[in-house]
Image (cartoon, rainbow, N blue to C red):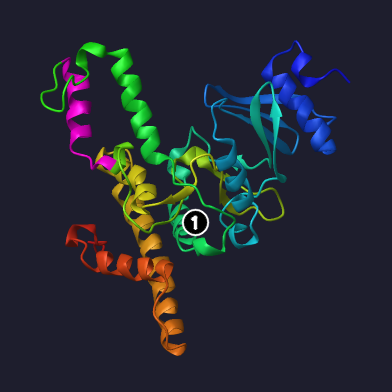
Amino acid sequence: MVPLNDRPAGLPAALAAYASTVWPDTAPHPYVLLADRDDGTVVRCGAAVVKAHAEDTDRGGLAVRMRIAGERALAEVLLPPLTVEAGHVLRRPVSLWPYGAPVDPARPEDAPWEEVARLLAALHRVPVHTLPGPVPPMRGPAKVARALHRLARALPDAAPPVPGGVPGPADARAVWNAARTLPGWARGVGEPPRGGVLCHGDLHLGQLVRCPAPDGAWRLIDVDDLGLGVPAWDLARPAAWYAAGLLAPEDWLCFLDAYRALTVQTAALALAKAAAGNRDLDEGERLMVDSCARISALPPELEPQPPS
């Protein structure tokens, strides 16, 4: 066999060759290129998907995230990898996964928002201390910082030279002004709030797939940004879609209701178990109860309205 690094056909073909050596069931299948970006190249080989992560990926962090994805406690939340060990192809760390059918991008109205909320709530309630570690921080804030740096390179005349005024074109100025309203941790500067739960870090509809038959259940994929963080981060993108008019109010309320319901369930059980054991809440349980306090303070406009 020709070494993978010597194959002339490029990264996608090398990934397919890697998959056939690690997961022999993929050997009879030609590969299909699913994505090819700087931060990840993904090919499908039959029932398997192989992903080359970014070359500058934190290998140690990815190794922990892969082990977390393989945990049985998360089997009903995350699509588990075919192997928890990452490989390497053309200097890129590589992971191998079962293929799951994504949400049809041509029919976003079919997205199962209630199921997305249930999956997120279940992810956030996993006791972090039971997971392989050390659990790395969720990478969402770091990606905000990277996006702002990219904007500054692309439009240097619009970048803020000092923490004060923001010169430049109107569109870039709007982005920088919005960035200035963020706390430091949310744009990758300084320490995040203490505590935290297991967060996905990059929720969007492309991160949701149906498991292979006969299960057919929905699962979250892509653990590149998975880690310890503020659970509101995972709710932020659906909230932004709703605020921008891209997500129908009924879908947003369905999402909120499902998330809140599972949060209430988790907090109720936590309090009952702590009372029965005559003990204090642990950190994860306290976060769920605190979430209930925030839910109870939601403004009335976020409550579902009775049919007219």
Establish if 164 lies above or below 188. Answer: above
**Measured from the top left, where is residue 280 in percent x and y?**
39, 80
The residue that mark 1 highlights is 119
Q: Quadrant of the N terminus?
A: top right
Q: Does the magenta segment cover residue 93?
A: no
Q: Quadrant of residue 120?
A: bottom left
Q: Does the magenta segment cover residue 175?
A: yes
Q: Quadrant of the C terminus?
A: bottom left
Which segment did they paint magenta?
168-184
Q: Secondary structure at mark 1?
A: helix
**Measured from the top left, where is residue 31 in percent x and y?**
73, 25
Side of 186 where 168 appears, left or right? left
Residue in the picture at 20% in, 66% down: 297
**Measured from the top left, where is residue 27 in percent x and y?**
84, 31
Residue in the picture at 23% in, 33% down: 179
- Closest to the observer, 87 or 47: 87
- Closest to the observer, 301 or 75: 75
- Closest to the observer, 207 or 140: 140
Residue in the picture at 43% in, 71% down: 266
Q: Quadrant of residue 176?
A: top left
**Measured from the top left, where is residue 50 in percent x and y?**
68, 33
The overriding secondary structure of the stretch rendered in magenta is: helix
Establish if 17 lies above or below 251. Answer: above
Kindly give the residue lying farthest to the right in the view shown.
Answer: 1
Residue in the picture at 85% in, 17% down: 2
Side of 9 where 292 appears, left or right? left
Q: Amino acid at mark 1?
A: Leu
